[in-house]
Amino acid sequence: MVKQKGVKKWFPVIAPDYLGGKQICQLVTSNVSDLIGRTISLLLSELTDDPSHTTVKIKFKVIGIRGESALTDFWGYELDRDFIRSLLRKGSSRVDRIFEATTKDGYKMRITVLAITRYEASQSQKKKMRKAMMEIILNKCNKLNYAQFIQELVFGKIESDLYNEAKKFHRIKLAGVKKMKIIEAPIKLEEIKASLAEAA
């Protein structure tokens, strides 16, 4: 903990246990409560050490302090726009759907699913793909808690399931989650921040 105001100290920032609990960066502060709510952005490849994950940007939010480390929760996921653009060719179709979903333990997310077809898809095919991909995500959220959902998102299970569903309607180049962000979480960041400020 930072005992003396004005003295800056570095805190290792740790990924959630459900994503391996590794250090993702360091933050400096002279007031430990100021760390709560800070957002850290990085490439998924920096977390997984997998070069194929450089097309995904992820976000973490600091939600607590344990000893000398800042603890985080997963807070956002987005496919790189240039990567998406590189897959779009003349004659292919882009199929998006934005909706809200809530996990079993109360994390409310806004999710965009995306499919890119090899050839032009009809309106009927696009409609069926949108509906099918949304239903996969909603069904998962009904069964999974947030940590389980994020594990499936980060390690490719959701992408695989969406691809296998979308290809029933058309030949597919890509299907997956384009963007996910937290709208509402059961974590009370202001309360955590206030308790740390009192303890300092």
Image (cartoon, rainbow, N blue to C red):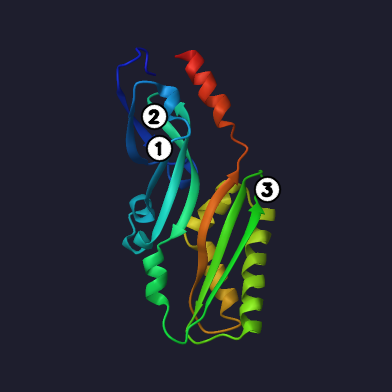
Residue 146 image offset from top left, x and y in percent: 59, 47
Report the amino acid beneath label 2. Answer: Ser
| Rendered image quadrant of residue 26 | top left
Residue 20 visible, this angle: yes
Q: Earlier in the sequence, mark 1 or mark 2?
A: 1
Q: Earlier in the sequence, mark 3 or mark 1?
A: 1
Image height check: is 26 above or below 97? above
Mark 1 and mark 2 in contact? Answer it, CB < 8 Å: yes
Image height check: is 200 above or below 102? above
Report the amino acid beneath label 3. Answer: Lys
Label 1 vs label 2: CA separation? Answer: 7 Å
Question: Number of callouts in the render?
Answer: 3
| Circle 3 SS class | loop
Mark 3 and mark 2 in contact? Answer it, CB < 8 Å: no
Is residue 171 left or right of 102 when viewed as pictured?
left
The residue singled out by tag 1 in the image is: 14
The residue singled out by tag 2 in the image is: 69
* Residue 121, numbered label: none
Residue 150 image offset from top left, x and y in percent: 53, 52
Residue 66 visible, this angle: no
| Circle 1 SS class | strand
Split into 4 quadrants, where in the image is the C terminus?
top left
Mark 2 crowd level (few <14, some 14–19, many ≥20, 10 Å Cα)? some
Mark 1 crowd level (few <14, some 14–19, many ≥20, 10 Å Cα)? many
Report the amino acid beneath label 1. Answer: Ile
Q: Earlier in the sequence, mark 3 or mark 2?
A: 2
